[in-house]
Amino acid sequence: MELVGESTKLHDENRQGEALDFTLDASPNGKKFYVESYGCAMNFADSEVVASILHAEGFGSTKNFEEADLVLVNTCSIREKAELTIRKRLTEFRKVKRTKPGMLIGILGCMAERLKSTLLEQEKLVDLVIGPDAYRTLPNLIKEAEGGQKGVNVLLSRDETYGDIAPIRLNSNGITAFVSIMRGCNNMCSFCVVPFTRGRERSRDSNSIIEEVKTLINQGYKEITLLGQNVDSYYWNDEISGLNTTFAQLLEQVAQISNDLWVRFSTSHPKDITDEVLHVMAKYENICKCIHLPVQSGSTRLLQLMNRTYTREWYMAKIDRIRSIMPECSITSDLITGFCTETEEDHQDTLSLMRYSNYDMSYMYYYSERPGTLAAKRYTDDIPLEVKKRRLQEVIDQQGILSTRSNQNDIGKIFKVLIESSSRKNEKDWQGRNSQNKITVFPKIDGKHQLGSYVWVKITACTRATLLGEIIETRLK
Ligand code: SAM
Ligand code: SF4
Ligand code: F3S
């Protein structure tokens, strides 16, 4: 197991092959597509843009790939394991194609960008290869592939944001939605493939973001998450008005649209999150008090090798700052064990920094060398797999202790919770999340509340990953 904590869909970079669970009934061109997505929330948001592009071309959709005319896999390259899983899946699709020759199989996303035409020309696993900035060309590429040509476009762009395309919400509960505010990443962390697969960082027009949020509210959505690899470096310069918008300003503008809308964001890079952002968070009740602030390692020496551009002490000061401005804010992290040259001492530094930061939850991985990254070029992947895994287990165990303690500290507290679904384990219970992004489960009261309601819940018990409680009917705000 590589991650601790419930799969909240918010920060889970480990999402594995989720098919859409929404059907576009109309199919004016008589064809249906099926899309399966892997990887981070940004990939899932992109699949919704792709669905919109295909819908405009007359495609309907299906949840069953065997009846699809077009099977798309939106892929992730972040770790080798992610790519291996996807390859296996492509082989399964290939088998079905043998019995259905008209079927087209396309690969989208980061693996398409990284491997370019290899999967099509050498391995003959797919008919279409489309990189993350080329989705507008999908309809033409489909036509080319139908005519027996190679449908490949992996050009990265300096300005594509798909800002004008209204995403079709897939796998949606109708209550929570992602809103992409930027694409790409300029950071060049040495272990990371994202700058190569997603290209240069670019921000989306703030007006189109605000419009999308308003549309979501009109459709009944109650929570949005502003998405980017590094949201704190969001910056929009409006050529018509001459006005500039920073992330803090965007966050404030979005929070002001409706008090009834919860606002989250992900991901923050520790070097970029500003006091201004923290103060805006503190000012608005509807901006959720949760910051995902990936540290990666607790050792300054390793952080330097990783090109993270902060030290252990600098990161600790950032944690102090968050806690002093918003004591109730939860803080979560990403951690990598066994990066090149990591010693036992470096590893102990990671464990102690976790304790210092008192993370409520973390996503934890062992280092997986990615071809073409700075680390792959400069350093030797010299930590044996069993050591990487043993250290990962120690990090997971440490997080288990911190998460359990954090949840136990919540017993007796009362939280506002947004109801998102019935509990998967028991239909008689609701499941939602509080502002701190903790999964909260509590019994339904006959006919009283519905999906999308905010309720006040008193916490009575917990597990490591979940708060358990009961609805408090009267709670003064
Ligand atoms: N942009 C975010 C940031 O800076 O933290 C997250 C980027 S990445 C999609 C999500 C996480 O995957 C990273 O924070 C890191 O912990 C992990 N990751 C990235 N490359 C990795 C690699 N080569 N091996 C193991 N984990 C990796
Ligand atoms: Fe990767 Fe670093 Fe960019 Fe995050 S900030 S996407 S870890 S290069
Ligand atoms: Fe994976 Fe690409 Fe996201 S590599 S984590 S899908 S940006």
Image: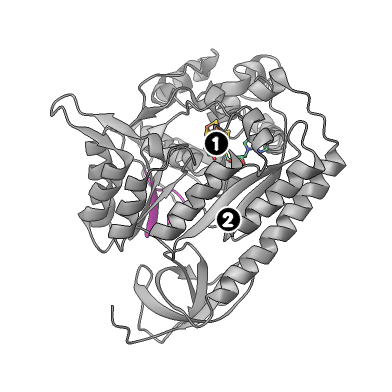
Mark 1 near ligand 1 (CB under 8 Å)? no
- Gap in angstroms between the C-alphas marked 2 and 1: 15 Å
Q: Please, what is the three-letter code of the amino acid marked with disc 2?
A: Ser
Q: Which residues are magenta?
A: 168-178
Q: Please, what is the three-letter code of the amino acid marked with disc 1?
A: Tyr
In which quarter of the view is residue 143 placed? Answer: top left
In the rendering, at what x and y percent does residue 175 appear?
Answer: 37, 60
Identify the residue under disc 1: 310
Ligand 2 visible in quadrant:
top right
**Secondary structure found at label 1:** loop
Is residue 50 shown above or below 170?
above
Q: Is residue 475 visible?
A: yes
Q: Point out the tag, 2 or 1, that comes first from the N-terminus.
A: 1
Identify the residue under disc 2: 357
Q: Is residue 64 visible?
A: no
Is residue 153 shown above or below 82?
above
Left or right, residue 420 beside residue 474: right
Is residue 306 shown above or below 320?
above
The disc label shown at residue 333, or none: none
In the rendering, at what x and y percent does residue 469 appear?
Answer: 51, 81
Magenta stretch secondary structure, dominant? loop
The residue nearer to you, when weighing 113 against 5, is 5
In the rendering, at what x and y percent does residue 235 appear?
Answer: 31, 32
The residue nearer to you, when weighing 463 against 339, is 339
Q: Residue at x 40, y 61 (%)?
A: 326
